[in-house]
Image (cartoon, helix red, strand yellow):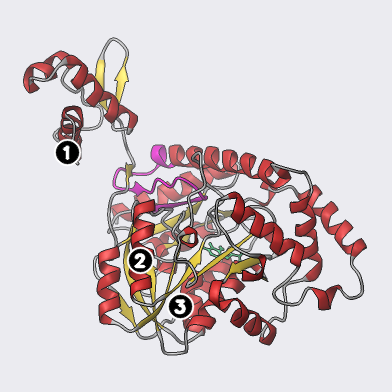
Amino acid sequence: MALTRYETLAQTLRRQIDTQVWLPGDKLPSLRESCKQSGLSLMTVLQAYQLLESQGLIVARPQSGYYVAPRKVRAMTRKYAHTLHAAEQVDINDAIFDILQAGQDASIVPLGSAFPDPTLFPQPRLARSLASAVRRMSPHSAMANLPPGNEELRRSIAQRYAQNGMEVAPDEIVITSGAMESLGLSLQAVTEPGDWVAIESPAFYGVLQAIERRKLKAVAIPTDVRTGIDLDALEQALDTYPIKACWLMSNFQNPLGCTLSSAKKSRLVAILQNHGVAVIEDDVYGELYFGAERPMPLKASENRSQILHCSSFSKCLAPGFRVGWVAAGAYAEHIQRLQLMSTLSASVPVQLALADFLQKGGAPGRYDTHLRRLRRQLEQRMMSMINAITDAFPACVSISQPEGGYFLWLDLGEKVDAARVYRRALTQGVSIAPGTMFAVDDRYRHCIRINTSFEWSPQTARAIEILANLVNEELRT
Ligand SMILES: Cc1ncc(COP(=O)(O)O)c(C=O)c1O
């Protein structure tokens, strides 16, 4: 679509800012000067300036004019892993284990953790639901709640799908011990050891662990920090390797935070369907959106029987309960069998407790009330963290701009060894997730992921200062 005149002017100015024709703090030509130079009307020039202002690139100073925003930390625009990366063998579990173990110390500021701040959740109410569930449990409960899992809970989950305009029958849903189990069972259902799986790059380390455990081969598809997985590269991979499954996150990807546009989701589903590839969709952060509406998962598309939609209550309601599920389409029965052969079932009292919690409170229900509050808090906390990092970190650092979830991805610049920053930060009581956790090689060795869910505190401020100092020291060496 052709750009309007003001968009064209804004694009020219944006390019000039990017190429440092104008530096942070520089005064831009006044509206009148700009009209004269461009031959455009005052209104058109004003619209262009206002567009750049709304994008945070310039700021208006009353009675003075427009200035290039003092952006010490730039919004990230880079695409990673320009090439496909095929790994015949994935070998990452030891490294990840060490990092996860190191983060368990309660005295450490857990910016590397994947867990949300536990104080964000309705603990007393959940405790009441749990107590009441245990009281009401019949002696036959264990048998009655074998796979696919508690019927009331599956119906509540199906109702939430329906609330979002998706038709998912309770029979299609299998309750699991967290999303980790639903993802692992899904992978097992659609692959045999030795098969190829397409994954994102960077990817959630759980993907890499599951692939290693099941002795699969991985093709890592370049994934953009704003627009998500590169579909041309995915098509190339599908033409090159006999890929059986694609495991990805279409909403608030971990670690990048990106969300696919609706158009891209449709194209992705069509591509994978044409190649007969099963989709393992990890949507654990889908409820944690900052905008007005929940971004739809791939599972919302018409052709969804090959899409295994995995999620859980771990990130949005009850982190310690370890309850998740998969809406498994054509694979539901197979997954039940696999679960019966492995963990047998998710814990019965916690399934009953969640069913109790979700059913009480009427429409819109206590769960929705909790989620609305949670989303607001997470957004505020992420903004505070972005501001703090912007103020403290050096100018070469760029930062992702997620519209949901609670992770920021920082590119510290090629000179910085994030694994060393990680080790040194740990000795000063701060954990971060180094980029090496999110790929089978060290291509993200200069990146880190930060958890922004914790309430801002003097400890967090100090942790950011420590990290900024370490990054500055790295840059000086
Ligand atoms: C992207 C992603 N998927 C899955 C999981 C696992 O979820 P659960 O705790 O429900 O097993 C996590 C947890 O960190 C995650 O970040």
- The amino acid beneath tag 1 is Ala
Residue 49, numbered circle? none
Image position of 399 (left or right of 32): right
Q: Judge whether residue 159 is colored magenta.
A: no
Q: Which residue is mark 3?
A: 92
Q: Nearer the viewer, mark 3 or mark 2?
A: 2
Disc 1: CA contacts within 10 A as few (<14), some (14-19) or many (>=20): few
User: How many neighbours does mark 3 have within 10 angstroms: few (below 14), some (14-19), or many (20 or more)?
Assistant: many
Residue 269 location (% of width, % of height):
39, 65
Please report the residue visible at 75 percent of the width from the left and 68 percent of the height from the top: 150
Residue name at image x 17 percent, y 32 percent: 13
Q: Residues within 10 Å of mark 2 (few under 14, many from 20)?
A: some
For the residues marked 3 and 1, what is the alpha-carbon distance in whole angstroms? 47 Å
User: What residue would you read off at disc 1?
Assistant: 2
User: Please, what secondary structure does the residue beneath circle 2 have?
Assistant: helix
Residue 117 rendering spot, x and y as whole percentages: 63, 50
Question: In this orientation, does residue 173 appear?
Answer: no
| Range of magenta residues | 389-410
Does the image show residue 138?
Answer: yes
First reached walking from the N terminus: tag 3 or tag 2? 3
